[in-house]
Image (cartoon, helix red, strand yellow):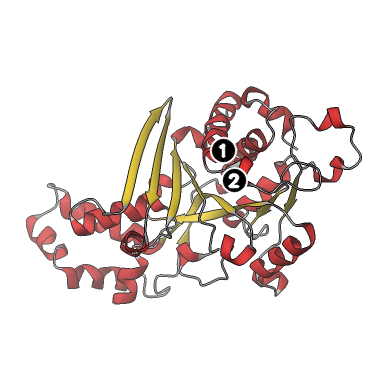
Amino acid sequence: MQELEQLSTLTDLAVEARNLAVERTGGEIQGVAVEEEEKENVKVTRIQVMNQQAAQRIGKAPGNYITIESESLRVADKLTQEYISGVLSDEINKLINYNALQPGMQGEPTILVVGLGNWNATPDALGPEVIHHLLVTRHLYDSSPADAKQGMRPVCALAPGVLGLTGIETAEIIRGVVDRVHPNLIIAIDALAAKESSRLASTIQISDTGIYPGSGLGKNRVGITQEDMGVPVLAIGMPTVINSVNIVNDTIKQLMNNPNVQPNLRGSLQQNNNHQQIIQNILQPFMGDLIVSPKGIDQLIRDTSKIIAGGINVALHPDIKAEDVSLYLQ
């Protein structure tokens, strides 16, 4: 029963973790600063976890988390994609201090972009798909004239696969590349898990805390963080899956709060033991391990990966403008 309660709150999103903590405690969490900004069809939430005490309360490491929410992420429209890519690039650059990065041999910091996930499983293929559309330039730097390099930075990319495909921990592969390539910054892209189904393919999270692949699904993996890699790590992700426990739990909560439901049924649901027993009975064959993705996830991954790749391209290369982002998608 306790395991089911833990599974019902699993999420990779700091904004959901913070909301859960506020709901649990009945007030704001000390040591967590929240700033919200409304833009055209986009809501940006910036959360700063200031200390370890706050981190323990919301279950997220100290650092900065930026959430971009928009239903327009699901719309396959060129102008919409360019606009959200521009918003994403602005927020990425708020977390990157290029002046503090050690410059590489070319005079500019080298950035390694890593697409995490399994390219054979569509809901987990966001990272590799973003890499497919990324503008990579590191291999051109040594052979290009100086004027051709202006406004561009050396960017390299890697899609290392997953443990089940390679037999090697993803973090070990990345660490080996870091030791050879010596990047000054790592950007890791991964598919995330959400608690609320409305956030699937409509939310992008950026953080400067690194990432633990699979953590939102209860898996324990070696972290891709500055402590593990030896260089700063920026994590970018979008929720593509939700645990079935969360769907059932949210459905029961809505029934409990629906005035059209018979009072005796609502009273029965409000008894915690009965509530948890219903969830256990429904999910007995899977014991909470059933993971759900939205309909049309293949098209959603294709569309949103272009938005994320476009935002990274604009952020890393000063001469690329948001209105021209589609020209640089590979």
| Residue 23 can be seen, yes or no | yes
Crowding at dot 1, Cα within 10 Å, few <14 / some 14-19 / many 20+, comes out as some
> Looking at the image, how many numbered discs can be counted on the residues?
2
Residue 172 x/y as whole percent: 68, 70
Whether 149 is drawn above or below 111: the answer is above
Q: As shown in the figure, which amino acid type bears the numbered disc 1?
A: Asn
Pick the quarter of the image with the C terminus. top right
Residue at mark 2 to residue at mark 1: CA–CA distance: 24 Å
Whether 100 is drawn above or below 81: the answer is below
Is residue 276 shown left or right of residue 70?
A: left
Is residue 137 shown left or right of residue 124?
A: right
Image disc number at residue 93? 1
Label located before the other in sequence (2 or 1): 1
Q: Secondary structure at mark 2?
A: helix
Crowding at dot 2, Cα within 10 Å, few <14 / some 14-19 / many 20+, comes out as many
Whether 164 is drawn above or below 73: the answer is below
Residue drawn at (42%, 46%) of the image = 199
Q: Secondary structure at mark 1?
A: helix
From the viewer's side, name the closer residue of 110 and 85.
110
Residue 101 x/y as whole percent: 65, 47
Q: Which residue is mark 2?
A: 301
Place residue 45 in its image quadrant.
top left
Pick the quarter of the image with the N terminus. bottom left
Q: As shown in the figure, which amino acid type bears the numbered disc 2?
A: Ile
Residue 86 x/y as whole percent: 56, 30
Image disc number at residue 70? none
Residue drawn at (19%, 52%) of the image = 27
Residue 325 x/y as whole percent: 67, 29
